[in-house]
């Protein structure tokens, strides 16, 4: 797809094939007023270096179209080799262009593989390369959102990156509510499934935190304007993206820390239960140890043991055992062990 940034963000219908050469295609406009907005960008090196806002074209291409058209779009033939494997959001500055990648996690399935695409920026255009229609859907949303606003490359990038962060604060707040509910259940003693749910939430929040950190780094790389592709004043819009991503990163980190707090609480509860069990076993051992000594003593097979022939030997031994148990319980109770 082909979009123009002249005056307003608009979509231009083209009969585009991978074999067509965009450097020679006359992008015919709907009316004469748009003539300068959709001419192919063929900036000279002198004029491009003096004009910070010469980027007027946005394209979304498939990988095959990108390989066919990148030289026609004034990108070097080796552009794109750095993005053979896409694993994160990033922006990298090269001598003649800016290259980057975007990996957008699915908010409903955060632990699954994110949707990824690449982007390339030079003095004449911004190109998104994707195997699906994710960039087109984002730009279509922007067309309606900014339909009455004058467009610039800096505002376009601001709006494009803003779409990645839409409703994310509400998403993080939903995680906070979920963690509050887990805490309430833990306080009631219902912790049988607490650990698996905490670990899942923690992994998802970590994925989001890393994503926001990458968006922040990407926005700040573009804001640096090393290649002088953007207006120095308008490029500060990208700082707003970095600041928003930084705030989301902080909120996500707070939720991760809260997960760790709940995990420590669950571990403390488990340790407390284990200590209670060990205390009970210690009490039982203390109570029955004297009885074990008595039974062991009278279990010896000696011939002459007077107590064995005593008439009241058996009830006396029972009375002594009960007395020992009573004394032990009194001592344990006095020391508040039980």
Image: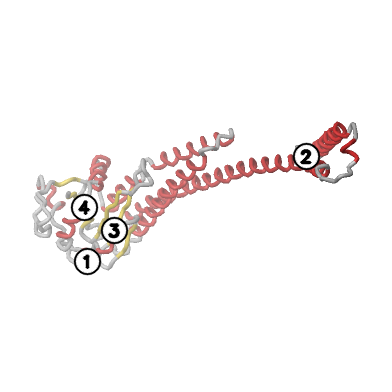
Residue at label 4? 58
Q: Where is residue 65 in the image (x, y as percent from the top left)?
A: 16, 56
Query: Quick one: label 4 or label 3, which is nearer the N terminus?
Result: 4
Question: How far separated are the C-alphas under marks 2 and 4?
Answer: 83 Å
Helix, strand or loop at mark 3: loop
Q: Position of residue 234 (x, y in %)?
A: 32, 54
Residue at label 2? 287
Query: Quick one: label 2 or label 1, which is nearer the N terminus?
Result: 1
Question: How far separated are the C-alphas under marks 4 and 3?
Answer: 14 Å
**In the rendered image of this protein, does residue 204 appear above or below residue 23?**
above
Q: What residue appears at the point 80 percent right and 43 percent down from the top-left corner? A: 299
- At label 3, counting other C-alpha atoms closer than 10 Å, the crowd grade (few under 14, some 14-19, many 20 or more) is many
Helix, strand or loop at mark 1: loop
Question: How far separated are the C-alphas under marks 1 and 3?
Answer: 23 Å
**For residue 183, what is the image quadrant?**
top right
Query: Quick one: label 1 or label 3, which is nearer the N terminus?
Result: 1
Q: Which of 306 and 142 is in front in this view?
A: 306
Residue 78: mark in rendering: 1
Q: Nearer the viewer, residue 243 or 338?
A: 338
Q: Position of residue 52 (x, y in %)?
A: 26, 60
Eye-nearest disc, 3 or 2: 2
Question: How far separated are the C-alphas under marks 3 and 2?
Answer: 83 Å
Helix, strand or loop at mark 2: helix
């Amino acid at each position: 797809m082909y979009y123009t940034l002249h005056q307003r963000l608009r979509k231009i219908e083209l009969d585009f094939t991978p074999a067509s050469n965009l450097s020679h295609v006359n992008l015919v406009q709907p009316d004469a007023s748009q003539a300068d907005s959709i001419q192919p960008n063929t900036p000279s090196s002198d004029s491009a270096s003096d004009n910070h806002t010469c980027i007027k074209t946005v394209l979304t291409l498939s990988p095959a179209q990108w390989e066919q058209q990148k030289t026609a779009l004034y990108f070097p033939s080796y552009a794109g080799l750095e993005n053979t494997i896409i694993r994160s959001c990033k922006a990298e500055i090269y001598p003649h262009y800016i290259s980057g990648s975007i990996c957008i996690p699915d908010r409903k399935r955060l632990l699954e593989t994110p949707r990824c695409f690449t982007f390339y920026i030079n003095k004449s255009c911004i190109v998104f390369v994707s195997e699906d229609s994710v960039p087109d859907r984002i730009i279509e949303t922007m067309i309606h959102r900014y339909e009455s606003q004058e467009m610039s490359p800096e505002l376009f990038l601001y709006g494009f990156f803003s779409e990645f962060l839409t409703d994310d604060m509400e998403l993080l707040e939903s995680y906070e509510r979920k963690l509050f509910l887990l805490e309430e259940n833990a306080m009631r003693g219902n912790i049988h499934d607490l650990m698996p749910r905490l670990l899942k939430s923690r992994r998802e929040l970590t994925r989001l935190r890393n994503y926001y950190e990458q968006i922040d780094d990407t926005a700040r790389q573009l804001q640096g304007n090393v290649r002088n592709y953007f207006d120095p004043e308008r490029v500060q819009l990208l700082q707003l993206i970095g600041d928003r991503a930084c705030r989301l990163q902080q909120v996500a980190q707070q939720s991760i820390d809260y997960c760790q707090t709940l995990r420590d609480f669950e571990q403390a509860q488990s340790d407390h239960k284990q200590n209670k069990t060990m205390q009970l076993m210690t009490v039982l051992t203390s109570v029955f140890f004297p009885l074990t000594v008595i039974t062991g003593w009278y279990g010896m097979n000696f011939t002459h043991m007077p107590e064995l022939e005593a008439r009241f030997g058996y009830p006396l031994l029972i009375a002594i055992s009960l007395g020992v148990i009573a004394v032990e319980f009194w001592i344990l109770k006095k020391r508040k062990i039980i």
